[in-house]
Amino acid sequence: PLIALPTGAVIGVIVMNKTRELNVFLRVGMEKMSGVVFMLLGTGTLAGVIANSALHQTFMYTLESLRFPPYVMASLAGALLSGITASTTAGTAVASHVFGKALVEAGVPSLAGAAMIHAGATVLDH
């Protein structure tokens, strides 16, 4: 989004022949993008911290000791991370990054794991 949106905007300005208003469009676009930039930076930082901490290992060991099947792990991982990040999108991205490999190793197909993580992440949004 940080490259595609500005590039698309500049191309749109050129195609619509509104190059004289480019500075206005750039200023408004930058104002609207600042929130997205902070969210992406925060999400990436949080994903790195969680991925390099013992949280995901502890979570997986706890669920395995309770003998939960892998599909429950995927849904709970999505719900846990969406709660931590306070965002369905960010929670899904972080959960898939942090728990994706473990879910695939547990025998969950990649697409099914992604769908289950997303389903779990939407629980706290509704």
Image (tube, rainbow, N blue to C red):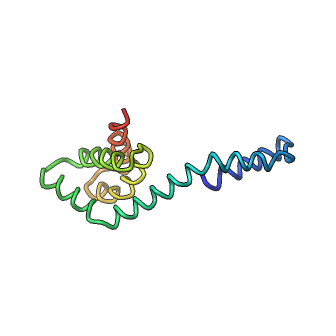
Left or right of 41 in this view: 126: left
- Above or below, 80 against 54 in this view is above
Left or right of 73 in this view: 5: right
Left or right of 106 in this view: 118: right
Image point 34% across, 67% down: which residue?
A: 52
Q: Quadrant of residue 88?
A: top left
Q: Quadrant of residue 75?
A: top left
As rendered, which of 113 and 85 lies closer to the eye? 85
Q: Residue furthest bottom?
A: 52
Residue 78 x, y percent position in the rendering: 33, 46
Q: Residue furthest left?
A: 66
Residue 95 x, y percent position in the rendering: 36, 52
Image point 50% across, 58% down: which residue?
A: 41
As rendered, which of 88 and 115 lies closer to the eye? 88
Residue 64 x, y percent position in the rendering: 16, 54
Residue 76 x, y percent position in the rendering: 27, 46
- Mark count: 0
Image point 56% across, 54% down: which residue?
A: 37
Q: Residue furthest top?
A: 126
Q: Quadrant of residue 99?
A: bottom left
Left or right of 3 in this view: 109: left
Q: Quadrant of the C terminus?
A: top left
Image point 40% across, 59% down: which residue?
A: 46
